[in-house]
Image (tube, coloured by chain):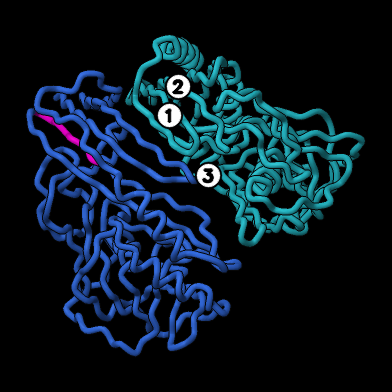
Chain colours: A blue, B cyan
Amino acid sequence: MREVYRKRGRSVRWEHGHLITVTESGQAIEEGQVFSAKPLRDAPPGMAAPHQAGEGVESVVDQIQTVVRSPLSIERLVVSEGSADHELGGMFWTETTRRVHLSMTFQRYRALIDLGDFEIDEIERVAGVLPRVSGERAAPDRVVLESAVTAALVPHLIGIAPPNVTLLQTAGGLDGKGRVIEESVLRGPPFPNWYRPSYRVRPQLVPLNVRARCSVTGIEPSLARAVALLAPPHGLSLRVLVVEGSDVYAATVHVDRIDAIAPPGRWYPYAAGSFGALMTVV
Amino acid sequence: MKPAHRFAIATCEELWTRECLEWRVSHGALQQSGTRITATDAADQELLSRAEERLREGRAAIATLPDVRARIVASSRRAGDRVRDDVIIVLSRAGLSLVTWPEHALEDWNWLEMCEAPPARRQVTYRGIPIVWTRGSAAVLFHEGAGHAAEHGAPPLRWPGWISVQDEPAFDDTGAAPRVADLLAGEPPRALRRASFVDVALPRMSSIVVRQQGATMDLPSPRIEISLLSGGSYEPLTDEVSLHVSVAHLIAEGARTQLSPFVIEESRQGIRRSLRGATGEPQRYPGVICSSEGQQLFAASAAPVMLTWF
């Protein structure tokens, strides 16, 4: 079987003080076990010219640079916006994306934030508490992971989630082969949908837009909160920034048990997409 | 002020496991003016032809290697009036991998075969045992401990007078003349490099050369001999280096025992204090794929045999 996929797009990205506008198109072919990709000079009829994108990028960069100020430092900031037209087997679809990657530092601490939109409220929150970090402490017995932390954890739960937690692929949109993404319970491979982050990458069956569900949804407001990642998740170990009353400290949380998960909220670009939600862990 | 410049690149890549399983062609060009970069996938036919020729060299180099798993990446780039061709081959075997060039592919493939681990390997704690860095592997120690530290503006340390570590680039992706940087003196790499036509050019290492002059070194026993690493990192917030050792042997009482992979974690000061000696001319290390800032760049590496003791 021979499958031909084409993509045409435009992106605007701010990185290292530069604004980069990229216009490109490409074609990928899967034939048996062989995958190939190359630029496409002539887009097929039906594939639109690249859309304008990126007007908001510099504005978001300005906002973030205003919020993340001394004594904090911006170690790395990448803000991008893109639009792309896709074609596979006579089917056409369009996609727009927004991404923010920020690592901000204070003394020997680094907070990592990845967003799939340009709402920077979480950046403001973390930038507000990170300068108050007082050192390293043992993790509290019970802690509430905030949305951005949960979203990074959820993809690591696939296949090992405890019995009281259900992992779900969330319905909505089209996958990397133009197929409808439908709701499904995720227990392990094979997964039903294709992930294709670039035409240069061989598509893979992976869970998309993952969320976690628990029969208990109530979150105790008095518990300590893990508000940001201080390092990428290492399995079920999370190095996080904890706010407990007026105290702010760094801790490593090993997730042994999940007691409650609030309804899902924001979408984040972890793995092939995941939803954040308040989550009480032990 | 950022220099205005044009840059173009063509890249051909193939993944082989007995047969070619993946191939990719990529090309494009950018124009930079100040801090604005406009990039398209425009083809420079001369660069594309040159990259295809280099790809054929890579393909020929792996053609005789039995059951090979290899990724060949050939590229040709133009910045200003300069053109540069590259071809590297990533060879993988039994969980080990290295980066090499067509002219060294057979030699390095045979060496990887010799490194295939026996079923039982010994575990040791590296501290307290002299470590001899063979086959140019000390270049990785300084890639992280001197090169990346300099990129992040870490203050220079008082290194022994017998050692020098330089980045010696052959090309600058903005078209400027490539210039040598003294990494131990804290100079960041002076060549600006980018992985592709969609990337910002950044000061990145191109070719690390560690040299010794007037050092001495005895081979202690017992000792650990390191010959291949699978990765490393420098943490600018703590000034600490992590090195993932994939091939090492314990030499003791005339026996040579392969060790399980282990991780060396030391501060930059700890590395400086650990240096005990070196011998000989710089030896070619297979090479390093450097992945910082989201751009994967190959850095050539060479170092003499070196002795450390943590």
Mark 1 lies on residue: B197
Q: What range is drawn magenta here?
A: A83-89
Mark 1 touches mark 2? (CB < 8 Å): yes
Where the N terminus of chain B falls, by quadrant? Answer: top right
Q: Nearer the viewer, mark 3 or mark 2?
A: 2
Q: Earlier in the sequence, mark 1 or mark 2?
A: 2
Q: Amino acid at mark 3?
A: Ser
Q: Does the rendering let one see residue A44?
A: yes
Q: Amino acid at mark 1?
A: Phe
- B296 or A96, which lies in front? A96
Chain containing mark 3: B
Q: Which mark is residue B8?
A: 2
Q: Which mark is residue B292?
A: 3
- B67 or A163, which lies in front? A163
Q: Are marks 3 and 1 on the same chain?
A: yes
Residue at x 30% of width, y 44% of height: A54
Chain containing mark 1: B
3D distance between C-alphas at marks 3 and 2:
22 Å
- Does the segment drawn in magenta span residue A76? no
Q: Nearer the viewer, mark 3 or mark 1?
A: 1
The percent position of residue B293, horizontal first and vertical second, equals 50, 45
The percent position of residue B305, horizontal first and vertical second, equals 78, 36
Q: Amino acid at mark 2?
A: Ala
